[in-house]
Amino acid sequence: GFSTDLNNAEFGTLQESKNMAGGYRYIYGSQFHPEKPQFVFDAYNQSNDIVHNLDAVYCNEYFATFFVNECRLRNENKMDQETYEKSVIYNYSPDWFNHGESAPEQLYFFPGP
């Protein structure tokens, strides 16, 4: 799907990989947070434009459930406990950014290879 930003520039909001040589790659990407209509109610500077009606909750709950189920169906990750513990996001500290125009954003920066 596509959306437009505040400057009317179009961007992809939801992506799914295509069938590739050697087999299908189950890769999905989204530029939105399907959990927000259900769980985010803060209004920073009274500028929170998140819709919380029943349709928004059901629609975004579908996406969240779909993503989780895809992970369950396609979990070919055979990771041992030590590798898992080295890989989890909780090993990294987020940086918080706020330029005074919106709610603070939490970003992670990872070291290069």
Image (cartoon, grey):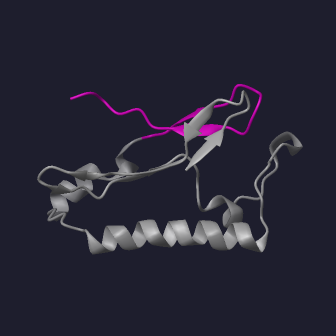
Q: Position of residue 74 (x, y in %)?
A: 25, 69
Residue drawn at point x = 35 percent, y = 33 percent? 110
Q: Nearer the viewer, residue 33 or 92?
A: 33
Residue drawn at point x = 88 percent, y = 44 percent? 46
Residue drawn at point x = 14 percent, y = 65 percent? 78
Q: In which quadrant of the rendered view does residue 38 lie?
A: bottom right
* Magenta region includes residue 109: yes
* Magenta region includes residue 104: yes
In the picture shown, does residue 21 fall above or below 104? Answer: below
Q: Which residues are magenta?
A: 93-113
Q: Position of residue 26 (x, y in %)?
A: 29, 59
Q: Residue furthest left?
A: 22
How many numbered circles are shown?
Answer: 0
Image quadrant where one finds the C terminus: top left
User: What secondary structure is the stretch in magenta mostly built from?
Assistant: loop
Q: Position of residue 64 (x, y in %)?
A: 51, 67
Q: Position of residue 111 (x, y in %)?
A: 30, 29
63 to the left or right of 70: right
Q: Nearer the viewer, residue 90 or 47?
A: 47
In the picture shown, does residue 78 fall above or below 1? Answer: below
Residue drawn at point x = 78 percent, y = 53 percent? 42
